Image: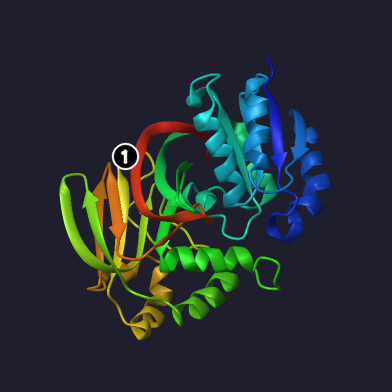
Amino acid sequence: MKKKFFVIINPNAGKKKAQKDWAVLSNLLTNNGFQFEFTFSNGRMDAFNLALDAIANGTREIIAIGGDGTFNEVINAIISQKNCTSTDITIGLFGIGTGNDWCRTLKIPCEYNQALEIIKTGNTFLQDVGVAHFEYDGIKSSRYFANVAGMGFDATVAKKVNDDKDSSHTGKILYLKNLLLCLLKSKIVNCEIKIDDEKFNTEIFSMSVGIGKYNGGGMMQLPNAVPDDGLLDITLIKKISKFDVMKQTKNLYDGTFIKHPSVALYQGKNVEITSDTLVNLELDGESVGHSPFSFGILPKALKVYIP
C-alpha cells in the first residue's frame, strides 16, 4: 500500500515564505507521486494539535514545513501521543525557518527538490529526544526537544530573535544583530549544576544542553554532539568578558570557541540546574520558561527521514 502523508505547513515561516511557496511545494509533491493531505497551522501550538489529531486518525507519515519551532511542536505531538509507539511515526522536514538548525544537524538541505528527494528515497534515522522540565509563571512544565536547549545568554538572544522575526533581517544576520544587542545587557549568574552524579557550583554566562550540534542559526554550540548516542551534550560558557564574547563570535560557527578557557564540555543522561536568579530557557529556538531546570533523554525515540 502506498504511503499517505499528512503535511503541516506553518504559513508564517521564513517571513511567510512557506505560504508563498506552498503552490510550488504542493506541485512538487504531486508530480513526484506523493499521496497527501495538508493543513496550515494557525498560531502557537497549533502544529502540535494538528499533528496529535492526525496521529489519532491513523497518520503515521508526517511532513512538516516550517522552522525549528514548528518542528518542535510536531515532535512534542509524536512523543506525547498514546496511539502508537513514537517510532511508528516518521517525520520529513522542509526547513523554511529563521534558524533551520535541526535540519543543519541532520544535513537536510533547504533546497526543496533535495529535501523532497530525501523523503522519496525513504532512508530513516532513529535519533534521541531530550525532555526538559522547567517553570513558567511559577507552574512546573515539561517539553520535548529534538535539537538544543539553551539557557542564559543563549535564551535571551533566542527570545529577542523571536520578538524580531518581522524585521527586515533574516537568518544569520538576525541572530548576529541580536547577539550583539543582548550582549550589552547580559549578566553572569551563579548556578548549582548536577550532571549525573557530579555536582558543582559555577558562574554561568550561557549554557547549552543538546542532542544536535547547532543552534542560533548555524552556531556550533555542541560540536561533539551525536544525535543517537543516548547522551546529552552540555556546553558551559562560564564567567567571560563581553569583549571576549565578541572576539569569539566567528568561532561559534565552526565550534572552535570550545578552546577558550571559559568553556567547559560535559556529557550525561541527566542534568539539573538551579540558580540564584531566574535563568530563561529556549528549546529548539522557542522561548518556553525559566529555572529551575532538569533534563533527561529518550534514546532513539524519533524516526526522521535523512540523507
Give the residue furthest to the top.
Answer: 1
Q: Is residue 116 visible?
A: no
> Could you say which is closer to the camera, residue 275 or residue 80?
275
> Residue 250 location in percent, x, y?
43, 75
Say which residue appears at 61% left-offset and 60% top-offset. 98
| Count of number-bearing discs | 1
Point out residue 180 in the picture as x, y percentages from the top left corner: 49, 79
Answer above or below: position of 165 versus 86: below
Front-lying residue, 172 or 236: 236
- Tell me the crowding category of disc 1: few under 14, some 14 to 19, or many 20 or more residues within 10 angstroms, Cα based: few
Question: The N terminus is located in which quarter?
Answer: top right
Q: Nearer the viewer, residue 251 or 32?
A: 251
Question: Identity of the amino acid at label 1?
Answer: Asp
Q: Residue at x 75, y 29 (%)?
A: 36
Residue 211 in the image, given as x and y percentages of width and height: 39, 46
Q: Residue furthest bottom?
A: 243
| Numbered disc 1: secondary structure | loop
Residue located beneath label 1 in the image: 229
Residue 77: percent from the left, percent from the top?
Answer: 57, 33
State the residue at coordinates (40%, 60%).
151
Q: Quadrant of residue 255?
A: bottom left
Question: In this rendering, is residue 166 above or below 35?
Answer: below
Task: Residue 291: name its quadrant.
Answer: bottom left
Residue 132 visible (yes or no): yes
Residue at 70 percent across and 30 percent down: it is 6
Q: Is residue 267 left or right of residue 81?
A: left
Q: Which quadrant would residue 220 be assigned to in this image?
A: bottom left
Residue 292 in the figure: left or right of residue 78: left
User: Relative to residue 164, is residue 85 drawn left or right?
Assistant: left
